[in-house]
Structures are given as structure tokens and as C-alpha cells.
Image (spheres, helix red, strand yellow):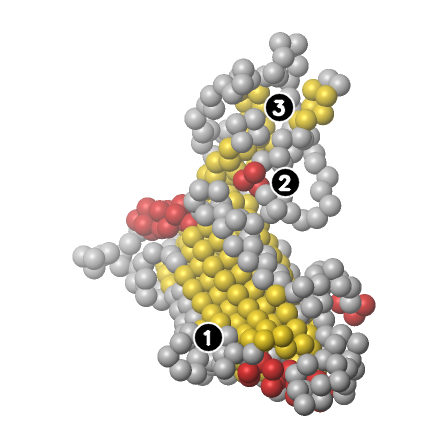
Amino acid sequence: TSGDVTNPLVCTADATSPPDNAATRLKSAISNGGTVQLTEDIEIRETLLVTRDVTLDLNGHVLKMTGDGSVLRVKKDGPDRVTLIITDSRPQNPHGSYADLPAGGVITGGKGTDAGGSVRSVGGAVFLENGTTLKLEGGTLTGNSSHGSVFINGATFVMTGGTITGETVGVHNNVGTFTMIGGRITGCSDRGVYVYNGNMTMSDTAYIGGNDTNQYPKTADIYVHEPVRKVTGLSVTGGIIEGKVYIFFETSNMKPDGESRDDDYNVKALKSVAESVVKGNGVLDGHIRVKMDDTPGTAVDYNTVNFIDEVAKTRTLKLVLQPNAVEEPETPTTVNGREFMYWTKEGVSEAWDFSTEIKGPLTLYAVRTPASSGGYYYYPTTDTKADDSKGSPKTADPGVALYAALSLLSLTGLTCTAKKR
């Protein structure tokens, strides 16, 4: 130990203590505010209450709840907004019992908090009350048995790093704001993100995919429920969604004049919503559904078709109403002397037949003439990847291997060091 027995908040990474003692010191440190760093794996039996600004550095260790309730609960205690920052200064630290997870710090075991009304047991890892903010910069949230590892109750959640996985619902946004700039949400059995009358923005290197592993009818990577508004609060300006997006408007299936809306009316009314979700550099590789109430015939289902031109470094997204064919986009212009020839699938040399009915997500690549005048063509070939992130295909020229990286597909114990009164 440091030898300063008058300050129980200070210890070194070599210090050991009984679980109850470590948990008590952690609780005290967090209640004081400031920067708190774990120096050992800690088990707690009671929720850690955050009422002052706190930076919690997992430091490659495990914070595990063995009792009931959320692991962390952020509560506004006064006029000022309270912010919790979760970071991890040792993201490379391995854990034998969490071998299938990313290395580094882990928050697990939370049972959640009763939010009242129809909402029960939410926020297993972090429960955010109104007027609070969570910034997730590192670490992994997993194994928290609740309807939402992070519950946003009219609060703000900014995710720039870290991973949320192995949960029932990754993020439950209840009339709050979720800004996902980086990090990954994957492997959640029900929904990656559930937005109830809230707002969500994806950008930069954020990744959501591989969720809804239960494959129930209403599961999705992102499920947006709009009980009041007629426009969606979901906006994808960057990052990648691989999977399903469902948007549900809880509105009447009647026109303003009282007549029933027919299928054609529904398609026109909801098409703009579906097309407004992904903007700019956002990537949706999967399926999107927009519907009004649960009346048969009110759902509009789209498959995504992504057109990638590696030479021009562009990507174009089209949503194709099931079960139709996709319209051919405008012919790309010549770039660096390489003329556009046709669109094709990865690993295929033949041109895509634009009369083909689209039955699932599709990605087509531009084939252009070579830079030289040798008469050789460039065909996309299968690109073996080491992980589940998306990348650009490889193109080939006799004797020369080119790899054009498309920028639009880039995913790309404790110590209290400061106190705030």
C-alpha cells in the first residue's frame, strides 16, 4: 500500500483487499467525484451512485455486480448536469474468464433498475436519469440481464469507443439523446438499440451489427418506436449498420379526410422516412422496415443496394422496395483516364442484370478500364477479412495487385487521483 492509512481512497495496483473493503472504497471514491481508477477486479453488491462528475477508468479490470440493481446509476443532485465518463487505460489487458470478449476493462452482472410504469429492470450496466450524461470511451459492457445495458431516461449518451455486447438490449433510449461516434454494438439477443420517441445519430467509425440473435419478429439491430412524431429521430451520417432497421409509427391508418389509407398511400408516406435515415457517408447494409401501427398492409420493406466505385472513392445507397429490381444509377464519369464499364458483384466478372429482383442486401462494384491501354479489365475479387467489419474489395491487373481502401467504409483495487467537492 502507499502507507497513507489516513486516506483510504489511495492504493497502488499491487494492493489487495477483501471484496467488501474494495467495494466500500470504490463507492466512497465515486461519491466524492473526480477520477477513479480500478487497480483490481472488484465485486459490488449495491449500485454505485454517481451524483458528481466522475471519470471511471476501468484500467483493464472487471467491475461486477453480484447483488441486484444497476452497476452504476447517474443521478442529478442539484442544478448542474452530472457526467459520468467510462474509459479504459489498459485496453490490451486479457481476462481468462472473458476470453471471447475484447481485451480490457469489463462491466458486468447488473440486474437493472425499475424505472416505473411499463418499464422494468433497465440499465443493467448504467442507468441515466434525466439531466445526466454518460460518455463511453472504452471498456466492454456485457452480461447485464436487463432490457437495456445502458438506459437513457431523458438523458444524453455519447459513445466514442468501447463495446456493448452479449446483452438483451444494448442501449434503451427513452425520450433521450444517443450520439454514437465510435465503438461497437453487437451480439445483443433482442435489439442492439431501442429508441422510444428519442433521438439517435450515428457517424464516423460507429458500428452496429450482428444483433437480434433471437430472430423474433420485432427484433432488430436498431428498433425505433415513434408514438408521437411522424418523422424518425434516427439519422445515420456515418458509420456502418449491418442488419435490420425497424421504424414503427404508432399513428392512425386514416387520411385527414377520414378515408382509409390504401397501400399506395402508405408506400408514398413512408418512403421518404426510410430514405431519410442514411445520409452522407452513412452505410446501411441490410434491411429497413417502416410501418404505421400493426394494421396489415401498412409496412414498407426495403432491401439495401450499395454501389461502390473504388476509383472515384464514392458509395451510393439505394433502398429497393421488396420485391422489385434496383434501378441503375447514373453512369459514373471517367476518372484518371479510366472509363466506367458496368456494375458487378464481388468476385463476379459479368455485368449485373438490372432486371433481377432483389431478395436481400446487395453490394455492386464499378468495373472500369485500366489506367494503361493494354486492354485489361479490373474485376472485383473476394477479399478475405480477419473480422466482421466491412472493407473494400481488391482489384487486379496482370503483375500488379491494387488495393483501393474506400474511406467511406472505414470502421474502421482502485486509485482516486482527484476529488471534486
Q: Position of residue 231 (x, y in %)?
A: 34, 56
Q: Earlier in the sequence, mark 1 or mark 3?
A: 1
CA distance for labels 1 and 3: 58 Å
CA distance for labels 2 and 3: 22 Å
Which of discs 1 and 2 lies nearer the camera? The answer is 1
Q: Residues within 10 Å of mark 3 (few under 14, many from 20)?
A: few
Q: Which residue is mark 3?
A: 350
Give the residue type that dot 1 points to: Val
Q: Position of residue 263 (x, y in %)?
A: 34, 50
Q: Which element carries disc 1, helix, strand or loop?
A: strand
Report the quarter where the N terminus lies: bottom right
The residue depicted at 39 percent of the width and 66 percent of the height is 197
Q: Which residue is mark 2?
A: 391
Q: Is residue 71 above or below residue 299?
A: below
Q: Which residue is mark 1?
A: 82
Which of discs 2 and 3 lies nearer the camera? The answer is 2
